[in-house]
Image: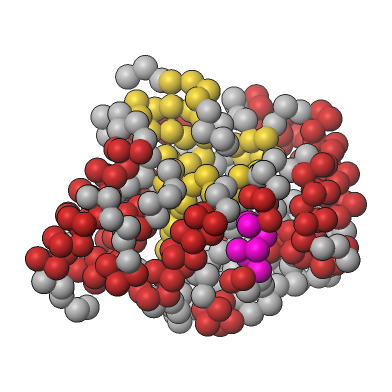
């Protein structure tokens, strides 16, 4: 790795801390610097400016994968099954209802509902499912990644605005940022050639924001992407947030190999330090994002706690249920008390929030 002169890093951080917007070149200087301590301090200072420095939020929700049938055939995914595979499934509504009732019983407020690109499901399936859920339960539907939205529209012969309008009317509250991977088409053509292009992914979020919905933004790095391409990903997110605000939070994580994904050994050997560097630079670069989530589910609890010193203000979900990352061989889980204890161990107040970052409960130290 190229070593960057300390004074160059100091110059970049001085400008950023003074309020100057970071350039792509600045971001690359920091990512190549290996100066983890100073980057962490700067990212934490920015986090403390825009969110409560004494609090860390988390949410109780459930990640339900309604189907694992998928025709996108992404070579990094160990979760999906091709149509007619005997291990494939579509969850009955009764099973989804039971999972929602369990979530509400644990104090949960949201359902993260995502699945594969099932070739046999049309928009009427989602309208029926969403409206049935909303008629029965007071729960926030954070559902369908951008690629799923496009898939539904394509197979239902609808335009993107029509698709989102109908899904919203049926009960869709917000859209998660899944499937972003790295928003550079060179990378996407290698790891997920049948999935959305960069422009398509951004287009779904732009239209959702235009219709008044909020979304989240993600980045999965560490496959075939370069540092320059990671920065391009951040730039595209920042530009869209400038143009049509609506991103509520950002979360990044490193690619998780194993569990049957076809990527095999053809990926980068990322480390915890790489993750913390990427996180800190993202906090400094994405100056129009408020909330940054720790990816403790993929990185482990200790690194998840350290992420709070590198720009994160939120620990995400306790993950009552999670299948995609688990299928890749990573399986970190927490209950509410352990989440609260993990936050309190960093010297901060644990705050349960809802999807829109409204406070549900503050836990006494």
Magenta stretch holds residue 172: no
How far from the left and from the top, in percent, is residue 89? 79, 57
Nearest to the observer: residue 265 or residue 111: 111
Please tell me which residue is depicted at 29% across the width and 72% down the height of the picture: 25
Q: Is residue 271 left or right of residue 97?
A: left
Q: Nearer the viewer, residue 339 or 192?
A: 192
Which residue: 74% across, 59% down?
A: 149
| Rendered position, 114 above or below 199 | above
Nearer the observer, 79 or 54: 54
Q: Where's the C terminus, which quadrant?
A: top left
Q: Position of residue 174 (x, y in %)?
A: 66, 44
Q: Is residue 202 covered in magenta?
A: yes
Image side of residue 12 versus residue 131, left or right: left
Chain part drawn in magenta = 200-206
Looking at this view, name the residue that lies furthest to the top: 364
- Can residue 185 be seen? yes
Q: Is 102 placed left or right of 311 in the picture?
A: right
* Whether residue 326 is visible: no
Q: Is residue 127 left or right of residue 280?
A: right
Give x and y (percent) for residue 35.
17, 62
């Amino acid at each position: 790795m190229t070593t960057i002169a300390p004074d160059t890093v100091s110059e970049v951080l001085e400008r950023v801390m003074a309020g100057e917007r970071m350039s792509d070149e600045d971001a690359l200087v920091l990512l190549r610097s290996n100066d983890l301590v100073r980057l962490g301090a700067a990212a934490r200072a920015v986090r403390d400016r825009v969110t409560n420095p004494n609090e860390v939020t988390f949410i109780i929700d459930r990640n339900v994968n309604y189907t694992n049938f998928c025709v996108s055939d992404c070579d990094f995914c160990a979760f999906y099954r091709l149509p007619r595979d005997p291990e494939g499934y579509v969850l009955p509504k009764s099973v989804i209802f039971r999972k929602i009732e369990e979530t509400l019983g644990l104090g949960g407020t949201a359902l993260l509902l995502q699945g594969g690109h099932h070739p046999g499901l049309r928009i009427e399936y989602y309208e029926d499912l969403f409206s049935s859920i909303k008629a029965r339960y007071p729960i926030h539907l954070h559902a369908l990644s951008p690629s799923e939205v496009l898939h539904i529209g394509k197979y239902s012969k609808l335009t993107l605005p029509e698709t989102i309008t109908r899904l919203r009317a049926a009960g869709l509250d917000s859209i998660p940022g899944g499937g972003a991977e790295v928003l550079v088409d060179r990378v996407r053509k290698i790891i997920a050639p049948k999935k959305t292009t960069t422009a398509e992914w951004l287009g779904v979020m732009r239209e959702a924001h235009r219709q008044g919905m909020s979304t989240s933004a993600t980045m999965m790095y560490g496959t075939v992407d370069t540092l320059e391409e990671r920065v391009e990903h951040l730039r595209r997110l920042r530009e869209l947030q400038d143009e049509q605000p609506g991103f509520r939070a950002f979360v990044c994580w490193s690619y998780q190999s194993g569990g049957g994904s076809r990527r095999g050994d053809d990926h980068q050997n990322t480390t915890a330090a790489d993750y913390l560097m990427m996180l800190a630079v993202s906090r400094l670069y994405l100056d129009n994002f408020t909330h940054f989530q720790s990816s403790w589910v993929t990185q482990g609890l200790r690194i998840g706690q350290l992420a709070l010193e590198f720009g994160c203000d939120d620990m995400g979900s306790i993950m009552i249920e999670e299948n995609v990352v688990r299928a890749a061989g990573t399986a970190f889980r927490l209950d509410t008390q352990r989440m609260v204890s993990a936050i309190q161990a960093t010297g901060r107040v644990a705050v349960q929030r809802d999807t829109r970052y409204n406070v549900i409960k503050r836990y006494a130290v």
